[in-house]
Amino acid sequence: MAIDATNRPVITLIDANGGNVRLFRLEQGALVSLANVTTLAGDPHVALQADGTPLVAFLQGFGGSNAAAVRVVRVVNGVVQQLGTDLDSVPDATQGISHPRIVMSGTEPWAFWVKNGLVRAHASTAQLDCAAVSGGRDRRLRLRCGRAGQRSDHCRRRRSQAQVLRFHNGVWEPGFDATARADHQDAINLVTRGTSAAMISSSIFRKAADVQRLVFQ
Amino acid sequence: MIRADGSLLAAHRPTATSTTGILTLSRYDATSDNWVTVVATANERPAHHALALAVDAQDIPYVAFTQQTAADPATYELVLKRLNGTTVELAAPAVTLSASARSISAKDRWRSMRPIVRSSR
């Protein structure tokens, strides 16, 4: 849920009957449908442009397979426009992709998601304390993941990576984003305020919660 | 979620069952270092998988969730409420969704169990 400049909440959710992404806005005391985006989708999150235009990040599934893609759409007057190409995808169940999130930094959308490139046996529940401060050139967001607490067991944990891209000049920019990572995360939530964002993540065992502070520059 | 005065407000589901779960709003009391219940039950009927929380520019928190409809436990409705003091009130009439609608911003049930803490915009 996001709230626009005129204090109207905008809500996205999945209507599981077909996996449609639904988008509603509170308008004069009623929840008005803005869009019924797609099918076989999941985990939608919404951010708003400065003019209130909703951007929705979600997982797009594909019939007959376990493939999935991270996709962002913009909804303008009920018309759904995909923003750039798919950001990332996995071909089947041997890999995982989850938690698409989107935030705005000025006029630029930033997309976050988690991808499990390698799935390994894992038994450790050691907490990974990620204490990261980001900063980069050209308004780029950088992540550093350092251990402030117990040593984590990299070898026995699922290697999940937080992925980050920004939409700039009409495309999702690759580059540092593909290597920026916070290992071992399979759940993220993002909050933003001004030029800062906090990424709250959970370990694969969902017992550890880590907070990273991200700074848009 | 961070209120205008800097206090934290969280929406969460204190129970682990998906069919009887209640939605609770809690405030973090820094003095006692405890989470204090503000609204024990925000929903009228069993809620579905998740909820979302946000605060507007006037520091009014909104909570959105899906719950069973009164007419049919297999059908869900989208509910948007706002916090007024220590009670929640409907911000709009609920919207009925398709049967077994999954809820807001969450794919799996466990994800809905984690607290959602959101800052103001």
Image: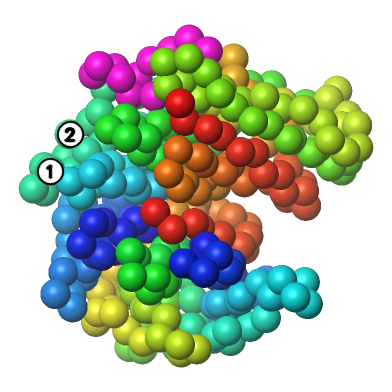
Q: Nearer the viewer, residue B59 or B103?
A: B59
Q: Is residue A161 left or right of residue A176?
A: right
Q: Position of residue B118 (x, y in %)?
A: 51, 58
> As drawn, which residue projects farthest toward the front?
B5
Residue occupied by mark 2: A81
Quarter of the view holding residue A127: top right
Q: Nearer the viewer, mark 1 or mark 2?
A: 1
Above-or-below relation of A79 to A183: below
In what element is the residue under mark 1? strand
Q: Position of residue A18 (x, y in %)?
A: 31, 51
> As drawn, which residue projects farthest toward the left?
A77
Q: Is residue A110 left or right of residue A18?
A: right
Q: Is residue A86 left or right of residue B20?
A: left
Distance from Cα at disc 1 to Cα at disc 2: 8 Å
Q: Is residue A80 left or right of residue B41?
A: left
Chain designation of label 2: A
In what element is the residue under mark 2? strand
Q: Nearer the viewer, residue A186 or A182?
A: A182
> Looking at numbered disc 2 in the image, what kind of residue is underneath it?
Gln
Residue occupied by mark 1: A76
Quarter of the view holding residue A31: bottom left
Which quadrant would the N terminus of chain A be assigned to in this image?
bottom left
Q: Nearer the viewer, residue A157 or A74?
A: A74
> Is residue A157 among the parts visible in the rendering?
yes
Tag 1 and tag 2, C-beta contact below 8 Å? yes
Q: Which mark is residue A110?
A: none
Are the residues under badges 1 and 2 in a single subunit? yes
Task: Please report the bounds of the magenta region as a residue range.
Answer: A165-178
Q: Position of residue B113 (x, y in %)?
A: 62, 63
Q: Position of residue A76 (x, y in %)?
A: 12, 43
